[in-house]
Image (tube, rainbow, N blue to C red):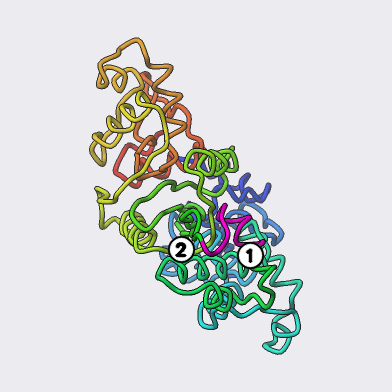
Amino acid sequence: MLSTEKKYEIFQTRNIEYSGQFYMAVKTTGIFCRPGCPARTPHPENCEFFESAKAALTAGYRPCKRCHPMNLPGEAGTLIKNLINLVENDPGRKWSEKDLLARGIEPSTARRQFQSRFGMSFSAYVKGRNLARARAEIAQGGSVIEAQLAGGFESSSGFRDAYSKTFGAPPNKAGRDPLFVDWVDSPIGPMITICSETALYLSEFTNRKNLKGQLDKLIKVYDRPILPGQTQISQKVADQLQAYFNGALTKFDLPLKPTGTEFQRRVWDALIAIPYGETRSYGELAVAIGNAKAFRAVASSNAKNGLAIIIPCHRVINTGGGLGGYAGGLDKKRWLLTHEGQPSHY
């Protein structure tokens, strides 16, 4: 467990990596905050810490209006949710800055929040969703002109160029099926999922090192574009992750499409076999796959599984009991193990 001194230091340095893992309440103001709050840090004697927002509320504190501790870390704000609803409720429309202003939305604010949340501009999101709709129209037997209209393209040449660049073929040949990226809020930070209509290809925390490299690998291996959107599988993933974080699910039931070598897939199968609430050392995992000397390769495979939490590499620790590594950050690994009932001294 983090000491009181360490928690105070995290607030002083505005370290957002711990956002959602504990809360600081200020006795003199009666408010409580999440790590990373931009407000000035009070003197330590005026602070007390809580493990949950509910505990702080029960103690009589009210949520800070600057860091919004009742929201999940990275949770899409009201503006972003409204923008997404605009796109989904009016398919094919090209949203201009004038359209946004007419709805009381400042375009620069929308651009900044979308870039922060999704790593793309609002206009890029709209274009991706419209191209996905156009591809679906063609896949369902629609004509090219129907697909062009579904995608909101006024110019047939512009539609052909954008479609061919994205799907690797002109509209009259449908082209490559896309994969769809969606975003999931969690108590320890936002995650992304990438799914087809039939399987989950990737689930990762957005702060994971080399996340771009993983996305590039998917595109290269499967030769499929990645567009924003949801499928039945991505919704199932989001539902099961939420149930896991709520303590209502201990074993995932999802169609998986992990991307790796035969050796790596053997390691990942062994990881999935580790029961909820238990851990294994890297050496024990090597024995489980029948190669006791391969613990270093096992550790490397752990870090490359690409399906965070669902392939539970967080359940593998050092032989001496130390945490070991975790691509999403040791703070997240510690939280996950504690969540699953492991000793809190990790």
Residue 55 seen in the figure: yes
What's under tag 1, amino acid-wise? Arg
Q: Residues within 10 Å of mark 1 (few under 14, many from 20)?
A: some
Q: Position of residue 131 (x, y in %)?
A: 56, 66
Q: Position of residue 11 (x, y in %)?
A: 63, 51
Locate residue 176 relative to residue 99 in the image: left or right: left
Residue 49 seen in the figure: no
Q: Which residue is mark 1?
A: 160
Q: Nearer the viewer, residue 233 or 75?
A: 233
In which image quadrant can residue 83 be found? bottom right
The mark nearer the N terminus, 1 or 2, is 2
Numbered mark located on residue 53 in the image: 2
Q: Is residue 322 magenta?
A: no
Mark 1 lies on a secondary structure that is helix
Locate residue 2 relative to residue 345 in the image: left or right: right
Q: Is residue 167 magenta?
A: yes
Locate residue 331 relative to residue 38 in the image: left or right: left
Residue interval drawn in magenta? 161-172
In which image quadrant can residue 35 be found? bottom right
Residue positioned most to the top: 293
Q: Nearer the viewer, residue 119 or 199?
A: 199
Q: Position of residue 301 (x, y in %)?
A: 42, 27
What's under tag 2, amino acid-wise? Ala
In three-dimensional space, the C-alpha distance between marks 1 and 2, rounded to whole angstroms, equals 51 Å
Q: Nearer the viewer, residue 93 or 105?
A: 93
In which image quadrant can residue 77 be found? bottom right
